[in-house]
Amino acid sequence: MPAHDPQPPQTVDEIARSLYRTAYPEMTDDPDWVEEQVSVAVERISRAEQADPSTSPGARRLDNAVINRAAPKPSRGPRIAAAVVLAVVVLVAVVLGITQRQWVAETAISSDGILGLSIAAVVAALATSVSYVRVRRRKILSCRVRIDAPFGVDIGETVRLEGEHAAVSDPGVVVVRVKNTGGSTIAAEDYVSPLALHFPGRQVISVDATEFEPVELQRVISKLPGFTIDEDRVQLPEVLLEREASYKLVIVLSGTIPGEKHQIAVEGVLRDGRITTREGKEKVGPGTLAWGGLTAICAGALAVVLLLNNVAPFTKLPRGVACEAGSLSVEGSSAFGRAATELAGSYEAYCPGSAVKVGTPGSVEGLQRLHDGTIDLALSDGKFDEPDFTRFVPQKLAIVPFTLVVSKNVPVDSLSVADVRKIFTGGARVWSDITGNPRDTGVIRVAGRSTSSGTRRTLEKYLLGTPSAPIGQAPATSDSCRDLRPGLAASSPIICEQGSTGDLIDRIATLGDAIGYADVSDVAQSTAVKKISLDGRDATLDDIRGGYPFWTVEYVFSRGPLESGSLASAFRDYLLTPEARNAMAGFEYYACAAGEQDLCSQR
């Protein structure tokens, strides 16, 4: 066949059979011998493909024989610039770390430092992801030469290969695997110049495509213009290849002299991609590795900083806070209990060597335990006139607003101070006594606090009576807030007492027609009750300034002056810091500082 004509597709065994029949015409009458030699040759080629091509007799090592002229020369400029910038950054970081250790440490554990590290870690992670996706989507065409070997025979035998017009001298075979190993489909328009194989010093005799994956690829290639053979060069058709699609080429050449070095050049250009002579798999690129390393550094630094922010002595303490080790017991107001518990936890977080235990038996009970010496500090809703408490040292903390609270079905949204007095002193039995509507027949169930409660004392001083002449809440007539105690007249009001703010709110939420009182912060935690305004005013700071009466000042008491350097002194001082004030503001308590000093001085 002419050297320049494309050859029809043939399999390896067909080529081998044709070669043996041409080389050994005297054996054509013995087909069994020919088939035996073909079988040996096919097995030899198959074994060479599956292992190292150099295992085929006469085959050469291909690492240094295959030249990839399709691979563009990488530009080193950007890489050098990136390396220089990275080196400068590392050098500056090392110098600052050595010469400015304290400044670096304080900056790192500050909120700005944590924010900066977080942003850097997120940016680096995004860059890593983008780089990885770009590499995975890159178009890569692998043209891998698997075998380049002369036709080998047993010792003492010679090979003569006859073409259609002349004998083929020094015949050889090259097996090439073409595969799309990138992350995108390679279309015909992606070839800037077609893929080609150049064999300097040798002549191409025939080309055969085989082993298509998927098999439909054979039909696609058969419809394309054939392989172009030009003496020592083969140009491949511009084949559309899906991801992982591949086929093999078996190329017969003349001039393959055993022991002589022959070169194979892979040529062609792929738009937005590259042609490689290797397997071509690229899971990660240099950019991905660099960004990934930076992500790991930033994430590691952030983790260390977050750890140091919770480990003494690295924790940066709020201004004015000192850490003291030991144990401390603080008891008193149940209304202030949630805030006190959070403040104690915050102090322990800043000062791991300390343990602050908070109890909420009520303001009066807390003061009594302080007097008895069983606790270190007491929290109280306001001051009390009991003789046992007069020697205590008070410290004002914050304004605590209280509100009246009722069950959802109660037919009022606002009460006058006179109405409140009537209800809590036992002068009203049913809601119609307040609303004047005969249809409001629900029995009023009053849920009040016990006599040890500072909230109850505030109610008696500022709603039921006056600071100089407080009027007591009516005594309890019920244990369940549902039924009167045995022996009481049916016309008696239903009044019960609860030991804590939480119990009172829960009781009102589960009863109908009930009313009670509690601090605003705790009432806001329940959606099963509703707040009641007083004379059109609510328990807000603005309305307190405008005359809303139901509020008090939260105090922290000690038995005497606190010893400097003690945990009690350090914790009491912490309660006066801006950090603690902000925490109290979250509970709708208004610190006795700056603009609220005048209000705090009133109580």
Image (cartoon, grey):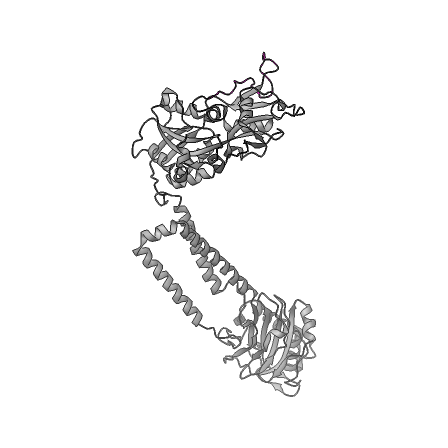
In the figure, 365 relative to 92: above or below? above
Q: Nearer the viewer, residue 587 or 134?
A: 587
The image shows residue 131 at horizontal and vertical percentages of 51, 63
Is residue 482 shown in magenta? yes
Asked whether residue 512 is in view, the answer is no
Q: Is residue 542 left or right of residue 391?
A: right
Asked whether residue 176 is in view, the answer is yes
Of all residues shown, which one is farthest toward the top? Answer: 487
In the figure, 538 relative to 266: above or below? above
Q: Nearer the viewer, residue 388 or 17?
A: 388
The image shows residue 107 at horizontal and vertical percentages of 37, 52
Q: Is residue 20 left or right of residue 557?
A: right
Q: How many marks?
A: 0
In the figure, 362 relative to 574: above or below? above
Classified by dominant secondary structure, the portion drawn in magenta counts as loop
Is residue 511 shown in magenta? no
Where residue 577 sits, quadrant-wise, is top left
Q: Nearer the viewer, residue 554 or 357?
A: 554
Where residue 11 sits, quadrant-wise, is bottom right
In the figure, 120 relative to 597: above or below? below
Give the extent of the magenta segment: 470-489
Residue drawn at x 52%, y 19% is 474
Quarter of the figure with the C terminus: top left
Residue drawn at x 32%, y 27% is 560
Q: Nearer the viewer, residue 402 or 61?
A: 402
Quarter of the figure with the N terminus: bottom right
The image shows residue 468 at horizontal and vertical percentages of 43, 22
The image shows residue 545 at horizontal and vertical percentages of 46, 36
Where residue 346 sits, quadrant-wise, is top left
